[in-house]
Amino acid sequence: RIFFFHDTMVKYARESNDATKSCKARGTDLRVHFKNMRETAMNIKGRSLSDAQGFLNSVMKMERCVVFRRFCGGVGRTAQAKQEGSTNGQGRWPKKCAEILINLLKNAESNAEVKGLDIDNLYITHIQVNRAIPQRRRTYRAHGRINPYMSSPCHVELMLEEKEEPVARAEEPKKYTRRQQAKLRSGIKSN
């Protein structure tokens, strides 16, 4: 794997509303297929940190599969995909993607610890996979020809945020029509 670490601050595609309650991690030029990584990333989006790590470990053990929704041409069908909520039944077990995402989540978790965030209350609010510059190799064909043999690496960025507890909404006073207000003032009870 090739990791490029930049000395300067990197701009993320999305910034958190509250930077004190979020943490980020990213990997650039990861030597793993973009399409597999995109599908794996979409499967863990919105999950809690522990749930996502558990899911990815299960994928590596082939106990659960990653459902393929967009890049699903030629992807085989499996019963595990139906259990994961797939409509087309297509799924795979991209081990390399799962491994890289586990490492990214571990990095984000350690960033959260440094910030003093509650690890048990972290959720993946943003995860994005972009195509990176393809790496070039060559393959040899019949009659002395040469064809390109390109790889499809990717960039991944993710953001974890603490989920806020919802505040109970205060009940608004009941609004009456003019006729109902007149009845209330006069003391007439309606059935």
Image (spheres, helix red, strand yellow):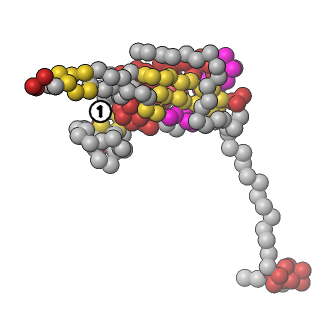
Residue 101, position as x, y percentages in the image = 45, 24
Report x, y in % for residue 188: 84, 84
* Viewer-nearest residue: 22 or 138: 138
User: What residue lies at 30% left-to-right and 37% top-to-bottom?
Assistant: 91
Residue 117 shown left or right of residue 160 in the figure: right
Residue lying at 29% horizontally and 47% vertically, measured from the top left: 88
- In this rendering, the answer to whether 30 lies above or below 82 is above
The image quarter in which residue 32 lies: top left
Q: Is residue 55 magenta?
A: no
Give the left or right position of residue 136, taking residue 38 as reference: left
In the picture, the quarter occupied by the C terminus is bottom right
Q: Work out whether 84 lies above or below 30.
A: below
Q: Report the residue marked by disc 1.
A: 92
Which residue range is magenta in the image?
Answer: 113-128
Q: Secondary structure at mark 1?
A: strand
Question: Is residue 58 at least partly visible in the picture?
Answer: no
